[in-house]
Protein backbone atom coordinates (compact mmCIF):
# COMPACT_ATOMS: atom_id res chain seq x y z
CA UNK A 1 0.00 0.00 0.00
CA UNK A 2 1.30 3.55 -0.86
CA UNK A 3 1.52 6.30 1.82
CA UNK A 4 1.10 10.03 1.09
CA UNK A 5 3.41 12.17 3.28
CA UNK A 6 4.00 15.87 2.58
CA UNK A 7 2.20 15.48 -0.80
CA UNK A 8 4.80 12.85 -1.88
CA UNK A 9 3.68 9.31 -2.63
CA UNK A 10 5.83 6.84 -0.73
CA UNK A 11 5.81 3.42 -2.35
CA UNK A 12 6.69 0.22 -0.45
CA UNK A 13 10.38 -0.76 -0.78
CA UNK A 14 9.47 -3.79 -2.93
CA UNK A 15 7.57 -1.64 -5.44
CA UNK A 16 10.40 0.92 -5.58
CA UNK A 17 12.99 -1.73 -6.32
CA UNK A 18 10.71 -3.33 -8.95
CA UNK A 19 10.34 0.04 -10.70
CA UNK A 20 14.08 0.70 -10.60
CA UNK A 21 14.88 -2.83 -11.87
CA UNK A 22 12.38 -2.44 -14.73
CA UNK A 23 13.89 0.96 -15.56
CA UNK A 24 17.43 -0.50 -15.66
CA UNK A 25 16.26 -3.42 -17.79
CA UNK A 26 14.61 -1.08 -20.30
CA UNK A 27 17.83 0.98 -20.47
CA UNK A 28 19.82 -2.20 -21.15
CA UNK A 29 17.35 -3.25 -23.86
CA UNK A 30 17.73 0.16 -25.52
CA UNK A 31 21.53 -0.05 -25.30
CA UNK A 32 21.82 -3.53 -26.84
CA UNK A 33 19.38 -2.49 -29.60
CA UNK A 34 21.79 0.35 -30.63
CA UNK A 35 18.77 2.61 -30.39
CA UNK A 36 20.35 5.74 -31.94
CA UNK A 37 21.86 3.84 -34.88
CA UNK A 38 18.53 2.10 -35.50
CA UNK A 39 16.74 5.48 -35.38
CA UNK A 40 19.05 6.66 -38.16
CA UNK A 41 18.49 3.46 -40.17
CA UNK A 42 14.73 3.98 -39.89
CA UNK A 43 15.12 7.62 -41.00
CA UNK A 44 16.90 6.45 -44.18
CA UNK A 45 14.23 3.76 -44.74
CA UNK A 46 11.51 6.39 -44.31
CA UNK A 47 13.12 8.62 -46.97
CA UNK A 48 13.38 5.63 -49.33
CA UNK A 49 9.69 4.97 -48.71
CA UNK A 50 8.75 8.65 -49.20
CA UNK A 51 10.62 8.90 -52.51
CA UNK A 52 8.96 5.78 -53.95
CA UNK A 53 6.00 6.17 -56.31
CA UNK A 54 2.83 6.68 -54.23
CA UNK A 55 0.74 3.52 -54.32
CA UNK A 56 -1.82 4.79 -51.78
CA UNK A 57 -0.98 2.37 -48.97
CA UNK A 58 -1.89 4.74 -46.16
CA UNK A 59 0.20 6.07 -43.28
CA UNK A 60 -0.64 3.40 -40.70
CA UNK A 61 0.64 0.62 -42.95
CA UNK A 62 3.74 2.66 -43.83
CA UNK A 63 4.40 3.22 -40.12
CA UNK A 64 4.15 -0.51 -39.38
CA UNK A 65 6.51 -1.28 -42.29
CA UNK A 66 9.12 1.12 -40.85
CA UNK A 67 8.58 -0.36 -37.39
CA UNK A 68 9.21 -3.84 -38.84
CA UNK A 69 12.48 -2.68 -40.47
CA UNK A 70 13.48 -1.01 -37.17
CA UNK A 71 12.72 -4.11 -35.09
CA UNK A 72 14.75 -6.39 -37.37
CA UNK A 73 17.64 -3.88 -37.32
CA UNK A 74 17.47 -3.79 -33.51
CA UNK A 75 17.45 -7.62 -33.41
CA UNK A 76 20.62 -7.60 -35.56
CA UNK A 77 22.23 -5.15 -33.11
CA UNK A 78 21.34 -7.36 -30.13
CA UNK A 79 22.90 -10.42 -31.82
CA UNK A 80 26.01 -8.27 -32.46
CA UNK A 81 26.24 -7.59 -28.70
CA UNK A 82 26.00 -11.32 -27.92
CA UNK A 83 28.50 -12.49 -30.57
CA UNK A 84 30.95 -9.67 -29.69
CA UNK A 85 30.65 -9.78 -25.89
CA UNK A 86 34.24 -11.03 -25.42
CA UNK A 87 35.67 -8.40 -27.78
CA UNK A 88 33.49 -5.71 -26.20
CA UNK A 89 34.79 -6.54 -22.73
CA UNK A 90 38.36 -5.82 -23.91
CA UNK A 91 37.68 -2.37 -25.37
CA UNK A 92 37.37 0.81 -23.25
CA UNK A 93 34.53 2.14 -25.46
CA UNK A 94 32.38 -0.98 -25.13
CA UNK A 95 33.34 -2.73 -21.89
CA UNK A 96 30.35 -1.33 -19.95
CA UNK A 97 27.83 -2.83 -22.38
CA UNK A 98 25.12 -4.96 -20.70
CA UNK A 99 26.13 -8.36 -22.15
CA UNK A 100 29.90 -7.70 -21.93
CA UNK A 101 29.46 -6.69 -18.26
CA UNK A 102 27.28 -9.74 -17.54
CA UNK A 103 24.26 -7.64 -16.47
CA UNK A 104 22.27 -9.42 -19.19
CA UNK A 105 22.94 -13.08 -19.94
CA UNK A 106 23.48 -14.14 -23.56
CA UNK A 107 20.35 -16.26 -23.47
CA UNK A 108 18.31 -13.33 -22.13
CA UNK A 109 19.62 -11.03 -24.90
CA UNK A 110 19.03 -13.68 -27.59
CA UNK A 111 15.46 -14.25 -26.36
CA UNK A 112 14.86 -10.49 -26.63
CA UNK A 113 16.34 -10.52 -30.18
CA UNK A 114 14.08 -13.45 -31.11
CA UNK A 115 10.93 -11.71 -29.84
CA UNK A 116 11.54 -8.38 -31.57
CA UNK A 117 12.98 -10.07 -34.70
CA UNK A 118 9.99 -12.37 -35.18
CA UNK A 119 7.59 -9.47 -34.46
CA UNK A 120 9.36 -7.31 -37.07
CA UNK A 121 9.37 -10.10 -39.66
CA UNK A 122 5.65 -10.79 -39.19
CA UNK A 123 4.85 -7.06 -39.50
CA UNK A 124 6.70 -6.92 -42.80
CA UNK A 125 5.09 -10.12 -44.13
CA UNK A 126 1.57 -9.00 -43.20
CA UNK A 127 1.64 -5.21 -43.76
CA UNK A 128 4.45 -4.75 -46.32
CA UNK A 129 5.33 -7.65 -48.62
CA UNK A 130 7.39 -10.86 -48.75
CA UNK A 131 10.18 -9.21 -50.78
CA UNK A 132 10.76 -6.55 -48.08
CA UNK A 133 10.63 -9.18 -45.30
CA UNK A 134 13.23 -11.35 -47.05
CA UNK A 135 15.55 -8.47 -48.01
CA UNK A 136 15.45 -7.16 -44.42
CA UNK A 137 16.23 -10.65 -43.13
CA UNK A 138 19.23 -10.76 -45.52
CA UNK A 139 20.43 -7.44 -44.07
CA UNK A 140 20.08 -8.87 -40.54
CA UNK A 141 22.10 -11.97 -41.48
CA UNK A 142 24.65 -9.76 -43.32
CA UNK A 143 25.28 -7.59 -40.25
CA UNK A 144 24.74 -9.99 -37.34
CA UNK A 145 26.47 -13.04 -38.81
CA UNK A 146 28.54 -12.31 -41.96
CA UNK A 147 30.02 -9.02 -40.65
CA UNK A 148 30.06 -9.63 -36.90
CA UNK A 149 31.01 -13.32 -36.72
CA UNK A 150 33.29 -13.48 -39.73
CA UNK A 151 34.40 -10.31 -41.61
CA UNK A 152 35.10 -8.21 -38.52
CA UNK A 153 37.71 -10.72 -37.34
CA UNK A 154 39.01 -11.63 -40.80
CA UNK A 155 39.93 -8.59 -42.92
CA UNK A 156 40.51 -4.82 -42.72
CA UNK A 157 37.93 -4.53 -45.53
CA UNK A 158 35.35 -5.80 -42.97
CA UNK A 159 33.34 -2.59 -42.77
CA UNK A 160 33.50 -1.91 -46.51
CA UNK A 161 31.82 -5.26 -47.32
CA UNK A 162 29.74 -5.41 -44.12
CA UNK A 163 28.60 -1.84 -44.69
CA UNK A 164 26.18 -3.06 -47.36
CA UNK A 165 23.83 -4.41 -44.68
CA UNK A 166 23.58 -1.05 -42.91
CA UNK A 167 23.15 0.70 -46.28
CA UNK A 168 20.07 -1.34 -47.26
CA UNK A 169 17.24 0.55 -45.43
CA UNK A 170 16.42 3.12 -48.19
CA UNK A 171 15.90 0.17 -50.56
CA UNK A 172 13.85 -1.65 -47.92
CA UNK A 173 11.63 1.42 -47.45
CA UNK A 174 11.13 1.80 -51.21
CA UNK A 175 10.36 -1.90 -51.76
CA UNK A 176 7.90 -1.89 -48.83
CA UNK A 177 5.87 0.58 -50.92
CA UNK A 178 6.25 -0.79 -54.43
CA UNK A 179 7.03 -4.50 -53.95
CA UNK A 180 9.62 -4.00 -56.71
CA UNK A 181 13.35 -3.25 -56.99
CA UNK A 182 14.32 -0.09 -58.87
CA UNK A 183 17.56 1.75 -59.75
CA UNK A 184 16.73 4.94 -57.80
CA UNK A 185 16.80 3.49 -54.24
CA UNK A 186 20.06 1.69 -55.08
CA UNK A 187 21.62 5.17 -55.49
CA UNK A 188 20.61 5.93 -51.89
CA UNK A 189 22.13 2.59 -50.83
CA UNK A 190 25.34 3.60 -52.66
CA UNK A 191 25.45 6.89 -50.72
CA UNK A 192 25.36 5.11 -47.33
CA UNK A 193 27.72 2.39 -48.62
CA UNK A 194 30.34 5.04 -49.57
CA UNK A 195 29.71 7.02 -46.38
CA UNK A 196 30.30 4.06 -44.04
CA UNK A 197 34.12 3.70 -44.39
CA UNK A 198 35.00 7.33 -43.50
CA UNK A 199 32.28 7.24 -40.78
CA UNK A 200 33.83 4.22 -39.12
CA UNK A 201 37.55 4.70 -39.88
CA UNK A 202 37.47 8.17 -38.30
CA UNK A 203 36.38 6.51 -35.06
CA UNK A 204 38.79 3.57 -35.51
CA UNK A 205 41.73 6.01 -35.85
CA UNK A 206 40.85 7.57 -32.49
CA UNK A 207 40.22 4.14 -30.92
CA UNK A 208 43.11 2.24 -32.53
CA UNK A 209 44.49 0.99 -29.19
CA UNK A 210 41.09 -0.55 -28.35
CA UNK A 211 41.10 -2.60 -31.56
CA UNK A 212 44.77 -3.59 -31.05
CA UNK A 213 43.96 -4.86 -27.55
CA UNK A 214 40.98 -6.85 -28.85
CA UNK A 215 43.06 -8.13 -31.83
CA UNK A 216 40.53 -6.92 -34.41
CA UNK A 217 42.14 -6.22 -37.80
CA UNK A 218 40.68 -2.75 -38.39
CA UNK A 219 42.44 -0.71 -41.09
CA UNK A 220 44.42 1.64 -38.78
CA UNK A 221 45.74 -1.43 -36.92
CA UNK A 222 46.76 -3.44 -39.99
CA UNK A 223 47.89 -0.65 -42.37
CA UNK A 224 48.71 2.24 -40.02
CA UNK A 225 46.95 5.50 -39.23
CA UNK A 226 48.48 7.47 -42.10
CA UNK A 227 47.26 5.04 -44.79
CA UNK A 228 43.84 4.92 -43.12
CA UNK A 229 43.61 8.73 -43.23
CA UNK A 230 44.38 8.65 -46.96
CA UNK A 231 41.53 6.14 -47.44
CA UNK A 232 39.22 8.44 -45.45
CA UNK A 233 40.03 11.35 -47.81
CA UNK A 234 39.59 9.13 -50.92
CA UNK A 235 36.19 7.84 -49.73
CA UNK A 236 35.10 11.40 -48.81
CA UNK A 237 35.76 12.52 -52.39
CA UNK A 238 33.99 9.42 -53.75
CA UNK A 239 31.05 10.16 -51.43
CA UNK A 240 30.78 13.70 -52.84
CA UNK A 241 30.59 12.27 -56.38
CA UNK A 242 28.00 9.62 -55.46
CA UNK A 243 25.87 12.24 -53.65
CA UNK A 244 25.48 14.19 -56.92
CA UNK A 245 24.00 11.19 -58.76
CA UNK A 246 20.38 11.59 -57.48
CA UNK A 247 20.39 15.11 -59.01
CA UNK A 248 21.98 13.93 -62.27
CA UNK A 249 19.32 11.25 -62.88
CA UNK A 250 16.52 13.72 -62.07
CA UNK A 251 15.53 12.01 -58.85
CA UNK A 252 16.19 15.17 -56.79
CA UNK A 253 16.28 18.90 -57.48
CA UNK A 254 18.37 21.97 -56.74
CA UNK A 255 17.64 22.13 -53.00
CA UNK A 256 19.15 18.66 -52.64
CA UNK A 257 22.11 19.47 -54.90
CA UNK A 258 23.04 22.63 -52.98
CA UNK A 259 22.57 20.94 -49.58
CA UNK A 260 24.61 17.90 -50.62
CA UNK A 261 27.44 20.05 -52.01
CA UNK A 262 27.69 22.09 -48.78
CA UNK A 263 27.62 18.96 -46.59
CA UNK A 264 30.23 17.20 -48.72
CA UNK A 265 32.50 20.26 -48.85
CA UNK A 266 32.54 20.26 -45.01
CA UNK A 267 33.11 16.46 -44.99
CA UNK A 268 36.10 16.74 -47.37
CA UNK A 269 37.48 19.73 -45.39
CA UNK A 270 37.35 17.78 -42.12
CA UNK A 271 38.86 14.68 -43.76
CA UNK A 272 41.70 16.75 -45.28
CA UNK A 273 42.30 18.39 -41.88
CA UNK A 274 42.56 14.92 -40.35
CA UNK A 275 45.04 13.84 -43.03
CA UNK A 276 47.23 16.95 -42.88
CA UNK A 277 47.41 17.74 -39.16
CA UNK A 278 45.09 15.28 -37.48
CA UNK A 279 44.95 13.89 -33.99
CA UNK A 280 42.35 11.87 -32.07
CA UNK A 281 40.21 14.97 -31.53
CA UNK A 282 40.16 15.79 -35.29
CA UNK A 283 39.22 12.17 -35.98
CA UNK A 284 36.34 12.24 -33.46
CA UNK A 285 35.22 15.57 -34.94
CA UNK A 286 34.93 13.92 -38.38
CA UNK A 287 33.16 10.88 -36.88
CA UNK A 288 30.56 13.09 -35.15
CA UNK A 289 30.12 15.21 -38.28
CA UNK A 290 29.60 12.08 -40.43
CA UNK A 291 26.43 11.35 -38.41
CA UNK A 292 25.11 14.91 -38.83
CA UNK A 293 26.03 14.75 -42.55
CA UNK A 294 23.98 11.63 -43.25
CA UNK A 295 21.04 12.74 -41.15
CA UNK A 296 20.81 16.20 -42.76
CA UNK A 297 21.41 14.76 -46.25
CA UNK A 298 18.42 12.42 -45.93
CA UNK A 299 16.22 15.13 -44.42
CA UNK A 300 17.12 17.38 -47.39
CA UNK A 301 16.30 14.55 -49.82
CA UNK A 302 12.86 14.42 -48.20
CA UNK A 303 12.33 18.22 -48.19
CA UNK A 304 13.46 18.40 -51.82
CA UNK A 305 10.75 15.92 -52.81
CA UNK A 306 8.01 18.24 -51.45
CA UNK A 307 9.64 21.57 -52.43
CA UNK A 308 11.09 20.78 -55.87
CA UNK A 309 12.91 23.73 -57.51
C1 LIG B 1 29.48 -1.66 -41.05
C2 LIG B 1 28.97 -0.43 -40.95
C3 LIG B 1 29.14 0.46 -39.73
C4 LIG B 1 30.08 0.42 -38.76
C5 LIG B 1 31.26 -0.55 -38.61
C6 LIG B 1 29.73 1.45 -37.79
C7 LIG B 1 30.40 1.69 -36.62
C8 LIG B 1 30.00 2.54 -35.64
C9 LIG B 1 30.59 2.62 -34.32
C10 LIG B 1 31.75 1.75 -33.84
C11 LIG B 1 29.91 3.57 -33.64
C12 LIG B 1 30.19 4.02 -32.20
C13 LIG B 1 29.20 3.40 -31.30
C14 LIG B 1 29.49 3.73 -29.85
O1 LIG B 1 29.85 4.88 -29.55
O2 LIG B 1 29.35 2.82 -29.04
C15 LIG B 1 28.90 4.10 -34.50
C16 LIG B 1 28.00 5.08 -34.15
C17 LIG B 1 26.96 5.47 -34.93
N1 LIG B 1 26.63 5.01 -36.17
FE1 LIG B 1 27.71 3.69 -37.25
N2 LIG B 1 28.62 2.11 -38.22
C18 LIG B 1 28.21 1.52 -39.38
C19 LIG B 1 27.12 1.86 -40.12
C20 LIG B 1 26.20 2.80 -39.75
C21 LIG B 1 25.00 3.10 -40.50
C22 LIG B 1 24.60 2.41 -41.79
C23 LIG B 1 24.37 4.08 -39.82
C24 LIG B 1 23.07 4.77 -40.15
C25 LIG B 1 22.54 4.85 -41.35
C26 LIG B 1 25.14 4.41 -38.65
C27 LIG B 1 24.80 5.37 -37.73
C28 LIG B 1 25.48 5.60 -36.57
C29 LIG B 1 25.03 6.53 -35.53
C30 LIG B 1 23.76 7.39 -35.56
C31 LIG B 1 25.96 6.44 -34.49
C32 LIG B 1 25.94 7.21 -33.15
C33 LIG B 1 25.35 6.30 -32.10
C34 LIG B 1 25.38 6.90 -30.70
O3 LIG B 1 25.70 8.07 -30.52
O4 LIG B 1 25.07 6.13 -29.77
N3 LIG B 1 26.26 3.63 -38.65
N4 LIG B 1 28.97 3.47 -35.71
C1 LIG C 1 18.19 -5.29 -40.83
C2 LIG C 1 19.28 -4.30 -40.91
C3 LIG C 1 19.07 -3.09 -41.75
C4 LIG C 1 20.41 -4.54 -40.23
C5 LIG C 1 21.51 -3.56 -40.02
C6 LIG C 1 21.71 -3.46 -38.54
C7 LIG C 1 22.67 -2.46 -38.02
C8 LIG C 1 22.46 -2.19 -36.55
C9 LIG C 1 23.65 -1.83 -38.73
C10 LIG C 1 24.57 -0.79 -38.18
C11 LIG C 1 26.00 -1.10 -38.36
C12 LIG C 1 26.84 -0.86 -37.11
C13 LIG C 1 26.36 -0.05 -35.99
C14 LIG C 1 28.02 -1.44 -37.08
C15 LIG C 1 28.96 -1.36 -35.91
O1 LIG C 1 29.24 -2.66 -35.49
P1 LIG C 1 30.55 -2.96 -34.71
O2 LIG C 1 30.40 -4.30 -34.06
O3 LIG C 1 31.76 -2.78 -35.58
O4 LIG C 1 30.59 -1.77 -33.65
P2 LIG C 1 30.62 -1.83 -32.07
O5 LIG C 1 32.02 -2.14 -31.70
O6 LIG C 1 30.19 -0.46 -31.63
O7 LIG C 1 29.65 -2.90 -31.67
Image (spheres, rainbow, N blue to C red):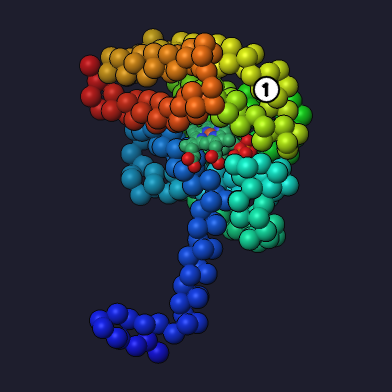
Q: Is residue 80 visible?
A: no
Could you say which is closer to the camera, residue 170 or residue 235?
235
Which picture quadrant has residue 164? top right
- Residue drawn at the location 32% of the way across and 26% of the way down: 300
Side (left or right) of 117 relative to 250: right
Q: Position of residue 166 (x, y in %)?
A: 56, 33
Q: Which residue is mark 1?
A: 219
- Residue drawn at the location 39% of the way across and 44% of the way down: 62
Which type of secondary structure does the marked residue at label 1 adopt? helix
Q: Is residue 184 visible?
A: yes
Q: Which corner quadrant of the figure contains ligand 2?
A: top right
Q: Position of residue 253 (x, y in %)?
A: 30, 16
Q: In the rendered view, would you say 296 is above or below 64?
A: above
Q: Position of residue 216 (x, y in %)?
A: 73, 32
Disc 1 crowd, CA 10 A, few/some/many (<14, 14-19, 20+): many
Side (left or right) of 307 relative to 113: left
Amino acid sequence: MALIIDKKILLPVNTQSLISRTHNLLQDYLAISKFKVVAMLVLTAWVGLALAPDVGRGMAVQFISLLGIGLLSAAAAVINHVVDSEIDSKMARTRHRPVAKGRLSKIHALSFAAVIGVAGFIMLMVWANTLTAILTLFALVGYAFVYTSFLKRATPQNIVIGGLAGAMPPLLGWVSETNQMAAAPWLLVMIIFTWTPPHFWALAIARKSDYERAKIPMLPVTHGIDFCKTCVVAYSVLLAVVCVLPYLIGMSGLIYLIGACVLNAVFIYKAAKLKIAGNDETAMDLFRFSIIHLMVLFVILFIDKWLPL
